[in-house]
Image (cartoon, rainbow, N blue to C red):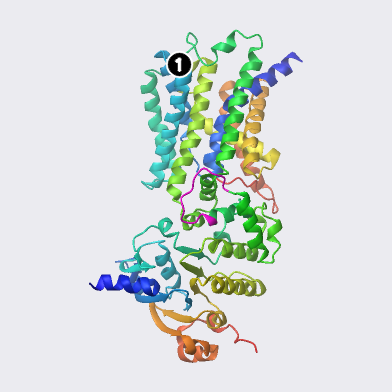
Amino acid sequence: MDILSGILQISLEQGLAYALVALGIVISFRILAFPDLTVDGSFVLGGAVVARMIVLGYQPLTGVVLAILIGFSAGCATGLLNTRLKINSLLAGILIMTILYSVNLRVMGRSNTPLLNYITVFTPFEQMEIRWLSVTLFFGGIVLASKFLADLFLHTQVGLAMRATGDNEQMIRTLGVNTDNMTVLGLGISNALVALSGALVAQHQGFADIGMGIGMIVAGLASIIIGETLLRARSVGMITFAAILGSCIYRLVITIGLWLGLAPTDLKMATGAMVILALGFPALKKGKEERIHLRGI
Amino acid sequence: MLFALCGFWNNMEEMLVLQNLRKIFNRNTIDEKAAIDGIGLGVSKGEFITVIGSNGAGKTTLLNLIAGTYPPDEGKIFIDGRELTLFPEYRRAKYLGRIFQNPLMGTASSMTIEENLSMAELRGKPRGLSWGVTKKGRERFRELLKTLELGLENRLRDRVSLLSGGQRQCLTLLMATLSLPKLLLLDEHTASLDPKTAEKVIDLTDRIVRENELTTIMITHNMNQAINFGDRMIMLHEGKIQFDIEGKEKKHLTVEEVVKRFGEKLEDETLLCKPVEG
């Protein structure tokens, strides 16, 4: 019983911590239909920025805000490469991700910045008796707030135009929308969410590391696929909720896997296989079985 | 002097003026083709023009040039007296409504009927952070959708992907006319529909165009449509205007006559259309 509740606790906490990445990927992959690979870099960027700011003696919250803004710019950079310089979307993301590797090392000044001896946004929770519950509520609050803000935004005039950009670019352009700007803005928002997640995770785990973003996209995709397969989500609100639920279930699967003896080094392989199976399985089946239709994935 | 005169003239009479338009594809290659080869055209306010011509005659290229999908190699385009030859597509939106042959192209399928209509209502206008779909808009859409008699007024929150091709094309038509464009471009918008639905869509088109006195250019493969609708008919051939008929002459035109005069320049598909019954 203890083990079970332990597994559930860890999964929920981790799931919520990384849910913002899934939310970000929803906006790039699902809303804009833009396969944005910047994520692996912008996640670390968020952590690196906040770590450097904390080490420099700034308020952790200031660091988080700055991380969000810089993450936003990183996403815009990918968008600009794609829309202004006409670089293929996948390549644009890979280019910025690669550039961010150097940027992140520059920001931190080294490959790993420990934060255990510094005051972070989680320090107030240390003294609390119910530490797990308060941390989880903290993450949960931020995730739900982000979800509702994203939902609201996607129902505004600009939000509709952004969704239409991913759905039918030609049509919304003939309605007078500059779809290039929509792509840049959307990728900015997406990577701002990812950087926020990186900033929080770094403080939560007590260090920022240059390798902490590897496989972030695949994990986020796995979360989205799990969530949408379970919920058959169609509306915006359901799609964002599915991403959060998927993130928690994905972490649950991972935690159980580790508990059952899966080597941590094999984690990324297992995740990759999971995504391949989910996306490829319907194609292998005979008959007219419809593929889970996830735009952009 | 000439330019000023043109501008004056445009403002008075013409909604659309094309001056010596040329568009050449695959320039300097063995496949070089002048898709539009020196077209000059003036379209009066409220005029409804039908355009025919065989495949490759340049019909769609002409609409693409007007809509700004790509710029012309030579010539100028004026809409309502304003030159917008080099304006990108999205900046011409406030002047133009456009409907394509493929019903999937005019609507965003993952979004609801009311969301699609709301986006169309803001055509060419700045978009902000206020609600995309408003209560007032919803009421207005319900009334407008009733006129289609497709029962869509009760399905405002349905995703467009649930609609049939004909229903989608009717919705697109409604969207194109929601904030009235100065010029409506129809690119064989009934061609992929079954005959009955096509008839319904073309009748709706005619009604909307006439009610709102919209300046309209309609490309069609269907000779009957070209003859029975509109005030003026233009035939394109190899990037040039082959003939241009209006007024009384257009009214009394028959399919047989067009075939007799220009048969050799029309392709089989167009000729196969049966003459009007009755």
Q: State left or right for residue B62 relative to residue B212.
A: left
Residue A104 sits in which quadrant?
top left
Q: Quadrant of the N terminus of chain A?
A: top right
Number of residue marks: 1
Chain letter behind tag 1: A
Pick whichever, A157 or A1, lies toward us. A157
Q: Residue at x 43, y 64 (%)?
A: B67
Residue A265 sits in which quadrant?
top right
Element under disc 1: loop
Q: Which residue is mark 1?
A: A59
Is residue A194 shown above or below B87? Answer: above
Q: What residue type is disc 1 on?
A: Gln
Q: Residue at x 64, y 35 (%)?
A: A241
Classify 10 Å Cα crowding around label 1: few (below 14), some (14-19), many (20 and above): some
Is residue B122 shown above or below A6? Answer: below
Pick whichever, A59 or A12, lies toward us. A59
Residue B71: give x, y in percent of width and height.
Answer: 35, 63
Write the start and end of the magenta stretch as one range.
Answer: B121-132
Residue B228 included in the magenta stretch of the image: no
Residue A269 seen from this side: no
Residue B101 sits in which quadrant?
bottom right
Pick whichever, B125 or B50, lies toward us. B125
